[in-house]
Image: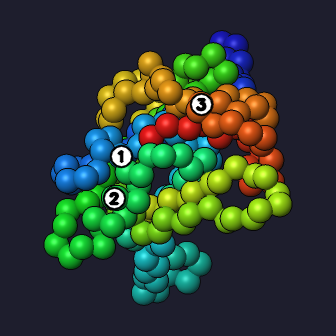
């Protein structure tokens, strides 16, 4: 019997993606969802595990590794700053003791045609840093704000629906970050690629 030919797939592109963050429990003064597709850069989709090593008595040429605690990377999201202030209201609510402010969400990687290539499902995320734009009167760059999230759980769901909110239909209002160096969404002005070498910044909240 002839061996089957190896299937080689083209890698996904990383310039187009949607982000959806929804509060697990609604918070007064914070929109729902907190964010829907406005981010232009995402970093920190990471899972790691430190194994527990066991040395068996009398066995000198091998060790046994047991599963340890899973750890998830700190998710960093960046976007062009607009009049939408839900992230700041969310961060202020998180600073009040006793408030339940975690969010669940999903990050969908899209192809150039806008179809979902892969989906990352987020659970129990807590805002731990919100950074405003660096202000400089001479450079004329877009004002960028940065959100950092501590992730409770991260799973990869593939392109099929299920396991989290479905973003396959896309999100309007500057939700999809398209290729090239142009600006999408509601922002005007010029774009500098010094912050992100991927795509333009989309507006909206």
Residue 4 percent across, percent down from the top left = 67, 17
Element type at marker 2? helix
In x, y percent, where is residue 153? 36, 56
Q: Is residue 113 above or below residue 45?
A: above
Residue visible at 71% across and 18% down in the picture:
5
Classify 169 as above or below 40. above
Residue 97, position in %: x, y? 21, 76
Q: Residues within 10 Å of mark 3 (few under 14, many from 20)?
A: some
To which residue does mark 1 refer?
A: 34
Which callout, 2 or 3, points at the residue further toward the start of the chain? 2
Residue found 37% across the figure and 27% down from its top: 166
For this rendering, which residue is in front, 140 or 13?
A: 140
In the rendered image, which residue does mark 2 sit on? 90
Residue 33 shown left or right of residue 1 in the figure: left
Q: Which mark is residue 185?
A: 3
Q: Are marks 2 and 1 in contact (CB under 8 Å)?
A: yes
Most foreground residue, 107 or 194:
194
Task: Estimate the spatial distance between the alpha carbons at disc 2 and disc 1, rounded to whole Å.
Answer: 8 Å
Q: Tell me the distance, in whole angstroms, between the alpha carbons under discs 2 and 3.
A: 23 Å
Which residue is painted at 24% across and 73% down in the image?
96
Residue 135 is labelled as none
Q: Position of residue 160 (x, y in %)?
A: 41, 24
Please identify the quadrant where the N terminus is shown: top right
CA–CA distance between discs 3 and 1?
18 Å
Q: Quadrant of residue 6?
A: top right
Q: Secondary structure at mark 1?
A: loop
């Amino acid at each position: 019997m002839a061996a089957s030919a190896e299937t080689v797939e083209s890698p996904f592109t990383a310039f187009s993606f949607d982000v959806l963050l929804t509060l697990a429990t609604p918070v007064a003064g914070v929109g729902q969802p907190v964010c829907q597709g406005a981010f232009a850069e995402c970093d920190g989709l990471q899972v790691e595990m430190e194994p527990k090593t066991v040395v068996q008595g009398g066995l000198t040429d091998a060790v046994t590794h047991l599963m340890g605690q899973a750890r998830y990377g700190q998710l960093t999201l960046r976007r062009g700053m607009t009049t939408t202030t839900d992230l700041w209201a969310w961060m202020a609510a998180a600073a009040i003791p006793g408030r339940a402010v975690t969010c669940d969400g999903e990050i969908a990687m899209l192809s150039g045609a806008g179809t979902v290539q892969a989906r990352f499902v987020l659970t129990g995320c807590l805002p731990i840093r919100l950074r405003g734009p660096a202000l400089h009167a001479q450079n004329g760059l877009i004002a960028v704000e940065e959100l950092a999230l501590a992730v409770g759980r991260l799973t990869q769901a593939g392109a099929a629906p299920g396991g989290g909110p479905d973003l396959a239909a896309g999100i309007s209002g500057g939700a999809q970050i398209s290729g090239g160096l142009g600006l999408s969404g509601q922002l005007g002005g010029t774009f500098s690629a010094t912050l992100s070498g991927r795509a333009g910044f989309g507006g909206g909240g």
